[in-house]
Image: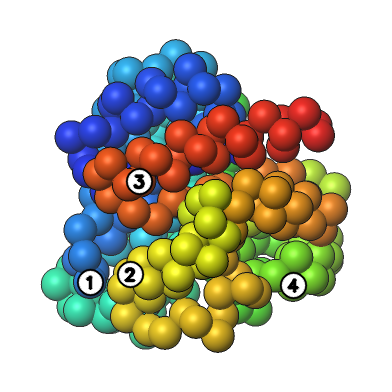
Amino acid sequence: MILTLSFDQQAVAAEARTAEDAGYDGVAVGEHLFFHGPHPNGFVALAAAAGATSRIRLLSSLTVLPLYPAALAAKLATTLDQVSGGRFDMGVGVGGEYPPEFEAAGVDVRERGARTDEALELMRALWQGGPVDFTGRFSRVPALSLSPGPVQPGGPPLWVGGRRPAAIRRAGRFGDVWMPYMYTPEQLTKSLGEVRAAAEEAGRDPAGIRGAVFCWGGVDGDAAHSRREVVDAVGAVYQQDFEPLADRYLLHGDPDRLVARAREYADAGADTLVFSPVGAGDRRREIVDLFTEAVLPRLTADR
């Protein structure tokens, strides 16, 4: 079970320590350069979390990879793997929900998929060690080596996120973990099979790819209140009405309902659930505390 940290960047270290003490397997941080509301930079926020913890895994959920020069992204990820002692997992997405951030970065949003694929190819090569001579459409590395290299052999595990067929193919080609969002358990099962088929086509071992799911959510003793709260909060993040989508894609309700839904995802192939709580300040802490006390132990006992 992985807990997404809040957007309060000054609270990242304390929240990560608390999550580690509570028994979570990992903490996660998403990112955007610009968006509808506040967002951190994932590499920097997770570096703060790394310095405050010693055991817990650190997941970027997700790094908007096409906004970075590929070699720079490889260097940042490698450095984070070093400072965390090999605890970094790199989640990758193409973004595109907010085109102005691509304009601000000088990147054509229409190229985001091609940029991401090329960046992943280059990063994998650099993480193998030794000089890399690479010429691509967007990147040129003239026989250079990353030094020091990553702590984890072959580099940080790659979690590929998304919802569309291109993301499924990308996960099959490059990913260690397929992590969709806004998916039902049934969609997860189907897509995980497609990812593994794509991996086999790419000459990779399909059995080596694990499943995960990213879920926005909340929990409350009053199930109806939780549903309203989650719908309103996620709708504000994405600037759309989530009322008709809530029961398919969002975690909400009392602790019993969350446990039941999480088990459905586990049965569908999710080895890991990434829980992204709604709310801010004291209210978010209340949601996290209830989840930690009434949901986490039951899911941990299932393993």
Q: Looking at the rendered structure, which numbered label has been put on residue 284? A: 3
Q: As shown in the figure, which amino acid type bears the numbered disc 2?
A: Val
x, y percent for residue 196: 80, 60
Residue with the mark numbered 4: 187
- Tell me what residue is drawn at x 54 percent, y 33 percent: 292
Residue 237, disc? 2
Front disc: 1 or 3 = 3
The image shows residue 74 at horizontal and vertical percentages of 38, 43
Please, what secondary structure does the residue beneath circle 1 have?
Answer: loop
Give me the C-alpha separation between circle 1 and circle 3: 19 Å
Q: CA distance from mark 3 to mark 4?
A: 29 Å
Nearest to N terminus: mark 1 or mark 3: 1
Quarter of the image for the C terminus: give it.
top right
The structure residue drawn at horizontal position 46% and vertical position 27%, both measured from the top left corner, is 19
Q: Secondary structure at mark 2?
A: helix
User: 179 left or right of 73?
Assistant: right
- According to the image, label 1 marks what residue? 36
Which quadrant: the N terminus?
Answer: top right
Residue located 81% across and 34% down the image: 302
Q: How many marks?
A: 4
Amino acid of disc 1: His
Rendered position, 195 above or below 28: below
